[in-house]
Amino acid sequence: MSIDTIFTFLESCYQVCFDLIATPSKRTYFLYMLTSLPIVYFIYKKQKKQSFLKFLLPKKVWLGKSAFVDYYFIAFNSIVKILLIAPLFIFGFKLAFHTTEYMNRWFGYEQIQLSMFSTMIAYTIGLSIFGDFVTYLIHLAMHKVPFLWEFHKTHHSATTMNPFTQYRIHPVELIINNLGAILTFGLMTGVFDYLSASQISKWTFAGVNVFTLMFNFWGANLRHSHVQFKFYNFLEYIFISPVQHQIHHSDKPEHYDKNLGSKFAVWDWIFGTLIRSKEVKRLHFGLGKKDNQNYASFLQNLLNPFKNMLGYK
């Protein structure tokens, strides 16, 4: 392997990390961080126990041991994304193509074509709902299937949370999550490509979902944070608020396996896994005192799932 190849690879890894704040499809996009500031300031004004800067950037949250585990996973997973996940996106486009072809074979060529505008509106709504439901099912499996929970523990081992804790994900879970997203994209894109008689480029389908854009603008990055941003009670039956997701990270047993939805709370409401913000007064994050000690470092989080599955202590 030449020096140029190594530098190109490292540059690609750096770009993956940099994209977390430079790409609109990411919750940590710098513009979403800025649009969250008025929300944070509003919540700060209600308590006002310290300066706004200290409230916004507490040292323990951003520079504590748990936070650095988040950052190490971002760096490590950039390698995983380049080597393993990026090639999988080609499969998503191939799945879309074959889905369209199969629908042509089963139902014949679409006679009544959706307009480009109608297709994009219907596709956006369909992908948002179906994609969120698939995400809920994968997340539910991560909590209920013992060997999957071993890998998902890494995400829940965070004892403090900042917006980048979202990316504190074990590589095995990262691959599973991306496979789910790619399958969802491929199937939905194929169906709507058929309905529009292939009027729209598949790269257009791959653009930023307008609902995701709205979701990210409205404080989505506060879900993994110390800032307690609640929605009105009735809205928390429909959408997951930042505090509801923080409840999901609680170390109390009664909060385990609750609020599993990504954007929508309706799945939790339907399947009985919903807790609303007003039902919880105090929160502590993590796996509980005993497990927190076993998942305190980056290497512990990376290796313990395999050790636990093999029965090593």
Image: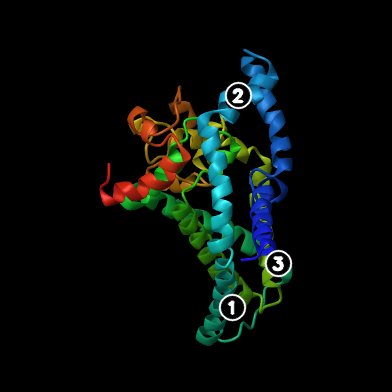
Q: Which residue is mark 2?
A: 59
Q: Which residue is mark 1?
A: 97
Query: Looking at the rendering, in which quadrant would you find the C terminus?
Result: top left
From the viewer's perspective, is 124 left or right of 166? right
Name the residue carrying label 3.
Answer: 204
Across and down, in percent, residue 178 comes to 52, 59
Q: Earlier in the sequence, mark 1 or mark 2?
A: 2
The residue closer to the viewer here, 60 or 110, is: 60
| Residue 197 visible here | yes
- Looking at the picture, which amino acid does disc 3 mark? Thr
Residue 213: x %, y % from top left: 68, 49
Q: Is residue 197 above or below residue 180?
A: below
Q: Amino acid at mark 2?
A: Lys
Mark 2: few/some/many CA within 10 Å (<14, 14-19, 20+)? few
Assess disc 3: are there few (<14), some (14-19) or many (≥20) residues with their C-alpha within 10 Å of its C-alpha. few
Residue 59 spot, x, y in % from top left? 60, 24
Residue most toward the left? 311
Q: Secondary structure at mark 2?
A: helix
> Is 20 rendered above or below residue 253?
below
Name which residue lies at 68% across and 15% down.
51
- What is the distance, in whole Å, between disc 1 and disc 2 at their CAs? 49 Å
Q: Nearer the viewer, mark 3 or mark 2?
A: 2
Q: Earlier in the sequence, mark 3 or mark 1?
A: 1
User: Which quadrant of the view contains residue 218?
Assistant: top right
Gap between marks 3 and 1 measured at Cα = 14 Å
Say above or below: 271 vs 49: below
Q: Position of residue 206 (x, y in %)?
A: 66, 64
